[in-house]
Image: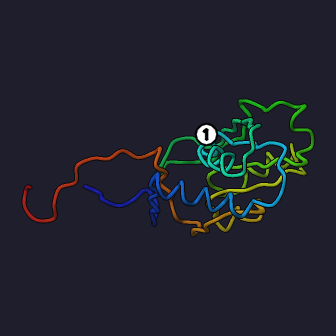
Amino acid sequence: MNDRLPHERGFHISWDQMHRDARALAWRLDGREWRAILAITRGGLVPAMIVARELDVRTIDTISVKSYKAVGAEAKQGEIQVLKAPDHELMGDGEGILVIDDLVDSGRTLEHVRKLYPKAHFATVYAKPKGRPMVQTYVTEVSQDTWIFFPWDMALQYVQPYRGED
């Protein structure tokens, strides 16, 4: 049996931690009027909802971008596809728009979205060094070889004690 994580390092995020970190992101983004929030689905939905609540932004749209195939150690980025685009009239060139995602990893997804909305402000809860230049605001940086386990990817299960059967 292999007990190793899919990557060299694992960073487990609980629902409570995600909530705290998304509120910290909102705190960093406060002080500016946002016309709307654009959540990058699927990972950006939860932090976008929390930030929208904290900053009292009522207009939220989504852009569905797919780039990863498989999960864990087998995860690979392929060609970037926009599966669902936001309202063009709302978005314009991105002026006054806050784009939110859970994580910037390589930066390819955000780079693609930035080409569509060059004047938008890009924010993520977590950032890896390779993708960090693609965001203006983030909360926590993790090493490039860290795999983040988000709460929506995890399930609680029984764990055998170190000693004994029960």
Number of on-image labels: 1
Is residue 160 left or right of 35 when viewed as pictured? Answer: left
Identify whether 81 is placed above or below 7: above
Q: How is the image coloured?
A: rainbow
Is residue 157 left or right of 51 when viewed as pictured? Answer: left
Q: Residue at x 64, y 45 (%)?
A: 44
Q: Which x, y percent locates residue 117?
A: 87, 45
Q: Residue at x 72, y 36 (%)?
A: 62
Identify whether 100 is placed above or below 86: below
Is residue 127 left or right of 118 when viewed as pictured? Answer: left
Q: Which x, y percent locates residue 148?
A: 51, 57
Label 1 Cα neighbours within 10 Å, binned few <14 / some 14-19 / many ≥20: some
The amino acid type found where label 1 is placed reads Arg
Q: Quadrant of the C terminus?
A: bottom left
18 and 83: which is toward the camera: 18
State which quadrant residue 23 falls in.
bottom right
Q: Element at badge 1?
A: loop
92 and 64: which is toward the camera: 92
State which quadrant residue 163 falls in.
bottom left
Q: Which x, y percent locates residue 34?
A: 82, 49
111 and 95: which is toward the camera: 95
Query: Which residue is label 1 attached to?
Result: 42
Q: Residue at x 76, y 60 (%)?
A: 30
Q: Which x, y percent locates residue 103?
A: 63, 55
128 and 15: which is toward the camera: 15
Q: Quadrant of the N terminus?
A: bottom left
State which quadrant residue 121 falls in.
bottom right
